[in-house]
Amino acid sequence: MSRSCPRTRSSRRFLLLKEEGVVCGLDIAEAVFRELDPSVEFERRAADGDVTLGEVARVAGNARALLTGERTALNLLARLSGVATSTRRYVDAVAGTGATILDTRKTTPGLRALEKLAVRCGGGTNHRFGLYDGILIKDNHLRLGGGIAESVRRAQGNDVAVEVECETLDDVRDALEAGADILLLDNMTLPQLNAAVLFVDRRAKTEASGGVTLDTVREVAQTGVDFISIGALTHSARSLDVSMEVR
């Protein structure tokens, strides 16, 4: 369709959020259009992080460039706004408990930085971006590394936090004694979480993870854990309905 537009024809378009949600990705949408038409005019009618419905931006420039970039810009805006909206729901659900909502590395290949930006727009906090900015010792690492104490010993001294996945209260005790900075309480029941938090007694940070939903997240937060990590923020978020229209 864009090939049928004269190269010199100008056009004004409106970016619309067709369902209420948290806006995220306006900078990215603008960058898409500017890549095709450096002189494009991009006027924001909302800011990333706003909860809104309807017009979020106006864009004017070469009609062919706008049509060429339309789908890429809309796909990114819809995806990132969906992640931000999902995150905000979890953040609102634990309000007042003191628990922080974290994302995970379960992101779309190539979009990690953008999806983690969307989590922040939704009020969440980024866990780690890669293997370089935090050490998380999981079950496979423990099997290969000689158990909790030895694995923690090998991981320490790298100027990053060392976190250990704990499946039982015995794991919690061992990880705490080994000097882990954060204990990942993996797929524990509410009674187990309560017992683990009580045992740790603020000697390390605690993070609940595994199967947390909007229906259960507040109960999990009320156990006293410091963090709740939710992979669904990025791997299962539904894109919002957005469109670009000529008016």
Image (cartoon, rainbow, N blue to C red):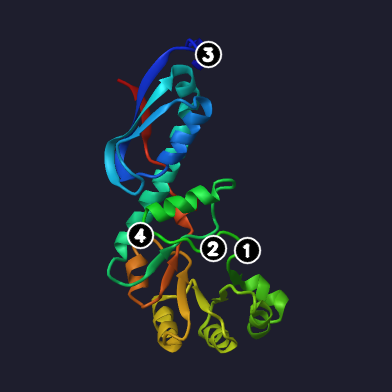
Q: Residue at x 34, y 49 (%)?
A: 49
The label shown at residue 230 is none
Tell me residue 41's x, y (percent): 39, 27
Given the image, on which type of amino acid does mark 4 rest?
Tyr
The residue labelled by disc 2 is: 128
**If you read the primary sequence from the N terminus, does the residue marked by circle 2 or circle 3 appear first?**
3
State the residue position of label 3: 3
User: Mark 4, mark 1: which one is toward the viewer?
Assistant: 1
The residues bearing labels 1 and 2 have C-alpha atoms spaced at a distance of: 8 Å
Residue 29 position in % (x across, y down): 44, 35
Circle 4 is placed at which residue position?
90
CA separation, marks 4 and 3? 44 Å
Q: Quadrant of residue 214?
A: bottom left
The image position of residue 212, as x and y in percent, is: 42, 64
Q: Is residue 116 left or right of residue 58?
A: right
Q: Secondary structure at mark 2?
A: loop
Q: Which mark is residue 131?
A: 1
Residue at 33% x, 56% y is 89
Secondary element type, mark 4: helix
The secondary element bearing badge 3 is classed as helix
Real-space CA distance between mark 2 and mark 4, rounded to the nearest whole angstrom: 19 Å
